[in-house]
Image (cartoon, helix red, strand yellow):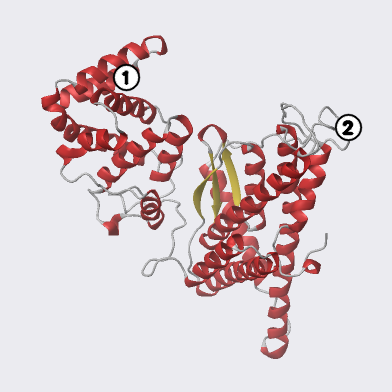
Amino acid sequence: MRELVESALGAVLYAPEDAYDLVLDQGASALSEPAARWARTGRTVLVVTGALLARLWRAGWQPADLARAVRRELTPRHQRLAVDLIAAEARGYAAAALDPRWAGQLRELEASPWWGEDDGFLPGVAARERADRFAVATLLLELFRLIGRLPPITLLAPPPGAAGDRGLSGRLPSGGGEPRMLGRIRALLAKAESTDFPEEAEALTAKAQQLMAQHSIDEALLAAGSGGGSDPGACRIGIDNPYEAPKAVLLDAVADANRARSVWSKDLGFCTVVGFPADLEAVELLYTSLLVQATSAMNGAGARRAAGRGGSEERVTAGRGPAARGGGPAADGGARTKSFRQSFLVAYAARIRERLAEATAQATEEALAGERAGERSGGPADSEPALLPVLAAREEAVRETTDRMFPTLRAGRAVRANDYEGWTQGRAAADRARLHGHSEALPH
């Protein structure tokens, strides 16, 4: 049976494009017939695909990466099946052998074996998807072709069974889940995004931003003072269509403000963010919150403008300039156009970069002021502030780690905005984005 399954999977994996449909049909027929061996086929499929996934993990992929790739390229049915295969393969590892981020991804995907005995796997999938055996076998083979062709990527965390490999996960401290401070930040941002009262949302987000800055600086000083601490790590954050380029620019702005670096892998649909663990958490949380705000503001602007205007979609190209400052082919296109929305998000990201840089400088200066006050009250009069060299050393460590992970990295082209109205409204929305509790805290 294993030879039959491996033969069908291998034939589909290596089939040329002009023969793929024929080979796919032949493989699905071979796996789905006769009905009497369908249950045994399912058990064998889990063994074979488990070995495939183990090789994929060693090639740098993680469960969330695979689920994202399947979602981008195939259908929800394929994604559900991929999560099933991930859950089956994960049964072979003790929870203690999993990197914390890895275990968190399994929880977020809700990857758990629901089918009981493995003989019930393929029959259970067929019942869930309301599909016959041939259709389920086709889904399986299409999924296998995608998985088998995924390229190696940077290893961020030790795969299960290789705990001795430190990886670059930027793992959370063990022994109690995520730090308590991060739990408070997460709760504040969740409340800020769900409330219908702008004043309440602004106050909640302001408190979250304050805790982020405090947490990052405290972690840096604590690590420097103890001579220990972690090395830079990395995480991957999905960048989904539509308007993936401006979203990548927004993430880069958030990463830069948090002394991290972001590298966009456009073809694979994610950015790799390199930084210290506390900063990686801040980047993930703040980027998600700002993206929610940007999308809401963009949709609101589009709804207001669409009431009085029409227009057609236009292609936006990459270039050096951040915006076409007036006129242009989309000057009277209206907010429903692709050009407007692209320009809106590009401008939003550009302005957020400015505001976050100002916020970071302000938080650093406040920490330095506190440090100098402490020195005047009891420290040596001629001692240098410890914070600046500590932060400089951490930024250099992040740069070196990024260069090591991506030795052939090159700068990409700037994303151009060619709709003036979208650009101006995007900057205005960024000015309204909730970074601090009081508008005067950040100069506009």
Could you say where residue 216 lies in the image, as x and y percent from the top left?
A: 59, 67
Circle 2 residue: 327
Depth check: give the residue in front, 382 or 264: 264
Circle 2 packing at 10 Å, graded few (<14), some (14-19), many (20+), is few
Label 2 amino acid? Gly
Q: Is residue 175 left or right of residue 372?
A: left
Residue drawn at the location 44% of the way across and 66% of the way down: 178
In the displayed orientation, state which residue is furthest to the bottom.
Answer: 378
Label 1 amino acid? Val
Q: Quadrant of the N terminus?
A: top left
Depth check: give the residue in front, 83 or 365: 83
Could you say where residue 37 lies in the image, as x and y percent from the top left?
A: 12, 27
In the displayed orientation, state which residue is furthest to the top.
Answer: 18
SS category of the residue bearing label 1 = helix
Depth check: give the residue in front, 139 or 260: 139
Q: Is residue 424 left or right of residue 218?
A: right
Q: Is residue 404 left or right of residue 70?
A: right
In the displayed orientation, state which residue is furthest to the front.
Answer: 307
Circle 1 residue: 12
Tell me the distance, in whole angstroms, between the alpha carbons under discs 2 and 1. 52 Å
In the displayed orientation, state which residue is furthest to the left.
Answer: 36
**What is the quadrant of residue 191 in the picture?**
bottom right
Q: Indicate which disc residue 241 carries.
A: none
Could you say where residue 72 lies in the image, as x and y percent from the top left?
A: 48, 33
Residue drawn at the location 60% of the way across and 53% of the way down: 287
- The answer to whether residue 354 is seen in the rendering is no
